[in-house]
Image (spheres, rainbow, N blue to C red):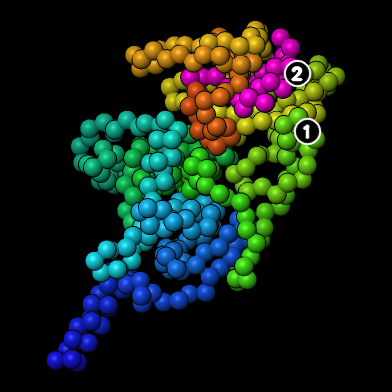
Amino acid sequence: MGWRRGLGIWVVLAILAAVGVVPLARAQAMEPLYFPATGHTLDDNARFLSFWQSHAGERLLGLPVSEPISTDAGIIQYFEHGRLEQKIDPTTGAVTVVAGAVAREYAAALYRSFAAAPPRLEQTGVRVFKDTGHTLRAPFLQFWDASGGAELFGAPISEPLWEATSVGRRQVQYFANVRIERDASLANSAGELVVSDLGRALAALRGIDLAAIENPGYSEAGPSATIAVVVAPLGGQPTATPVPPAAAPAAPAPAAPSVARARGAKWILVNLSDQWLYAYEGNIKVFDAPVATGRDGMETPTGNWAIYAKLPIQTMDGVLNGEYWVVPNIPNVMYIHGGVALHGTYWHNLFGTGARPSHGCVNLPLKAAAWLYKWAPIGTPVQVTY
C-alpha cells in the first residue's frame, strides 16, 4: 500500500504543476535577478519569477518597480505594467500567482467611469463579455488572445477610447488588470499594441516605495540603468537627480517664441499629458511643478489663456452630479479662463501622478502655488496643452 500512496502523491503534484499551482514546500529554487533599469529585484520566493518568465514578463508585465510587499492578503509586487499577487490555499498550502486588478483600481483612483457598450447583435469578430458589459474586437482582440487573455489581462472594463498617454493621444482599451495602447502609425506590426505603465502609476498613487535599491549580489537582467535627468526643485536651481521613467518629466522645448517671449516675458505652460506645469521667462525655464487637473466630464480646457484675476484666498463651491460641494480657504488663486484657475491644494497629494480629481482647475502643491502667485502678474499668458 505504501508504494500506491507514494504514487498518488506524485500524481497529485503533477496535476498541480500542470495547472500552475505548486505546493510552497516544493517550489523549485530559481536564481533571483536584479534589474538596474528600475533598481529592483525579482525572486521566486512567492513564485513571481516563475510566473514572470512563463508569461513574457518583460514585454507584458514590464520590470519590477517595487520590492515584494507583505499584506494581510499575501505577498504582492508591482511591475511597470501591472502587479502580481500570491495566493496560498489555507488547506493544502498550494501557491497560486495571479495578476492584480491594477487598471480597475487605477481608473477608480482617477475617478474614471466607463459606460457599458450599447446593446448589439452578435457579430463575427466581436466578443461580448456579459459580466462587464463590454466588447472586444480587432486589433485588441487578437492581442488579448495571443498575449495574456483573461489570466493576465482580465476582462475588458471599457470600450476602445482615445486618451492622453505619456507619448501623446492614443486609442486605448481598459481591462481589469491592464490598459492596452494602440499606436496607429505601427498598424499591422508587432509594435502596434503595447501595455501601459499603469502598475508604476498605481504604485505611485498608493505611496508605494519605488526607490531603487543596491544590487544585493544578484545576476543583472534587462536594460541598463536610466540616465539621470535635470529636475528643478521648488524654488531652487536645477540639479542632476536620478529619477524613474514616471517621475518628473524634462521640460518640453517651447514652441516658436513670440517677440515678447524672446525678450524674457513671463509665461506658463501646463502639460496635461505630463500633469506638469512649467514657468518660463522668454525661452528659459525658471520653475516647474507637478499638477492635478480636471476629471472626466470636467476636463481642464486646452487653449491659450492668461491670468485675468488673482485672489490670495477663496472659498469655492459648485454642483456635481446634483450634489453641492464646497471647499473653503483655497490659497493663491489665479483665474485663467472662466471659472478655471491655478491654485494651491491642501486636500490631496496626487500631483504629477496622473490622477485628475479636480472640477477643471489646475491643482498645485501649496508651496508651488505660493511661488507662482508671487511670480506671475495679471496678464501672464498660460498655455494649456497635451
Say which of 102 and 187 sits in front. 102
Residue 127 is situated, as x and y percent measured from the top left of the image, at: 27, 46
- Find the residue positioned furthest to the front: 72
- Find the residue positioned furthest to the left: 1
Residue 245 is situated, as x and y percent measured from the top left of the image, at: 62, 47
Residue 94, which numbered label? none
- Find the residue positioned furthest to the right: 263
Q: Is residue 379 left or right of residue 122?
A: right
Q: Quadrant of residue 54?
A: bottom left
Residue 375, which numbered label? 2
Q: Is residue 355 left or right of residue 152?
A: right
Q: Amino acid at mark 1?
A: Gly
SS class, disc 2: helix
Image quadrant where one finds the C terminus: top right
Query: Residue placed at 74% from the left, 17% from the top?
Result: 374
Which region of the structure is painted magenta? 359-386
Determine whether label 1 and label 2 are within 8 Å by CB.
no
Question: Disc 1 designates what residue?
Answer: 236
User: Residue 11 magenta-drawn?
Assistant: no
- Identify whether 113 is placed above or below 59: above
User: Residue 363 magenta-drawn?
Assistant: yes
Structural crowding at the residue carrying mark 2, measured as other residues with C-alpha within 10 Å and reported as few (<14), some (14–19) or many (≥20): few
Structural crowding at the residue carrying mark 1, measured as other residues with C-alpha within 10 Å and reported as few (<14), some (14–19) or many (≥20): few
Say which of 11 and 262 sits in front. 11
Q: Could one spot residue 260 in this view of the protein? A: yes
Alpha-carbon distance for marks 1 and 2? 14 Å
Of callouts 1 and 2, which one flags the residue occurring earlier in the amino acid sequence? 1
Image quadrant where one finds the N terminus: bottom left
Query: Residue placed at 35% from the left, 54% from the top?
Result: 73
Q: Amino acid at mark 2?
A: Trp
Q: Quadrant of residue 95?
A: bottom left
SS class, disc 1: loop
